[in-house]
Amino acid sequence: MIQTLEEFDAYVAAEKKIEPKDWMPDGYRKTLIRQISQHAHSEVVGMLPEGNWITRAPSLQRKAILLAKVQDEAGHGLYLYSAAETLGVERSDLVDDLLSGKAKYSSIFNYPVLTWADIGAIGWLVDGAAILNQVPLCRCSYGPYSRSMIRVCKEESFHQRQGYSIMVELMKGNEAQREMAQDALNRWWWPSLMMFGPSDKDSEHSSQNMKWKIKRFTNDELRQRMVDMTVPQAECIGLKMPDNELKWNDETGHHDFGEIDWDEFYNVLAGNGPCNKERLAVRNKAHNDGAWVREGAVAYAEKKKRKRLKA
Ligand code: BYC
């Protein structure tokens, strides 16, 4: 068991995992609680935009797939809240911070889902971005977080494929369907790039979190990967990226791309995106409506405890 800063540093340097009972710097604990809880909230709020489309999926098969995907997100939220709890916080406090609007969750879930093609774009782009961000987190220095990411990434990979497959189908369809797919890409592309966080020069946590091996790549490195990975996928099915400055750069071996609208990003983070208020209102209602389930679970646990004590 790690007991000193020297041992902690040596473990991190040797790529060994830090476990809940190990000694760790306060800042390490704090940043992990912040990141893991924000991540958990994102999974939970992420169910809302897609959940709205379960009843409107165009076929039984698409409905079953979407239902499974949304359930997966709930599971991801649960693993992540559990991982956060290993750091000494209560899940109910984390949830309270989400419900009151104090805690952050991913900016991406504050945009409206207007058509079925948006469900395709979300799977393809949002889950695509999630995979790029989360695969390196499987190697994060904190054991419980890194292990929870393994299963999450496997499931995200299926989510990404289901999204791309919706886009492929729409692009094989009639003109109206192709326009719907293009319109969804136009609206989701820039917000998806914002998912990776502020540019490196403005990212306050990156440098320390890289030293602690929580983060393995910077926000801009992962964003560049997203662009390089997605552009050929769009071209392959006849979609045009909504960025006039996008072009391949032979010298760097990457795509150059346009500037993100950072005012929009910070505005969404400040709670003023198109759907921030609606998302929190729906989440609060779901929490209040579910009070009886929590009360029932607590009563049952107490009954079992009483029985155990009697025996
Ligand atoms: N949205 O110093 P920085 C999913 C905040 S779930 C909102 O670069 P860091 C999915 C950041 O938290 C997707 N806030 O921070 C689910 C920090 O705020 P505080 C979620 C953002 O931590 C369902 C401040 O800006 N994924 O994919 O080094 C269905 C400064 O940023 C955002 C995760 O949570 C944003 N986009 O890097 C489908 C992955 N970006 O706390 C899909 C885990 C930044 O100082 N998280 N902020 O007030 C991470 O990898 C990192 O936390 C981030 C940010 C890359 C997001």
Image (spheres, rainbow, N blue to C red):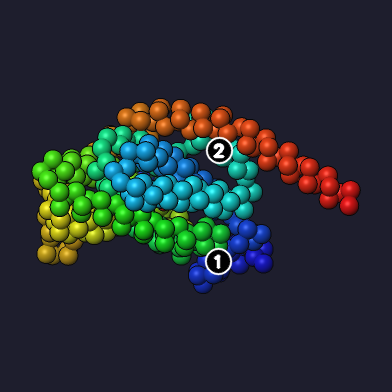
Which quadrant would residue 302 be assigned to in this image?
top right
Q: Is residue 286 left or right of residue 170?
A: right
**Residue type, numbered disc 2:** Val
Front residue (pair 228, 197): 228
Q: Locate residue 165: give its quadrant.
A: bottom left
> Is there any visible trace of residue 200 in the rendered image?
no
The amino acid marked with disc number 1 is Lys
The local crowd at label 2, few if under 14, some if 14 to 19, many if 20 or more residues have their Cα within 10 Å, is some
In this rendering, would 173 be left or right of 34? left
Residue 104, can we see it? Answer: yes
Q: Which of 100 and 178 is in front in this view?
A: 178
- Residue at image mark 2: 95
Which type of secondary structure does the marked residue at label 1 adopt?
Answer: loop
Q: Is label 1 or label 2 in front?
A: 2
| Residue 135 occupies quadrant | bottom left
Up the image or down, 49 lies above or below 75; here it is above
Q: Residue visible at 35% across and 30% down?
A: 275
The circle drawn on residue 17 is: 1
Task: Compute the Cα span from label 1 to label 2.
Answer: 27 Å
Q: How crowded is mark 1: few (under 14 residues within 10 Å), some or many (20 or more)?
A: some
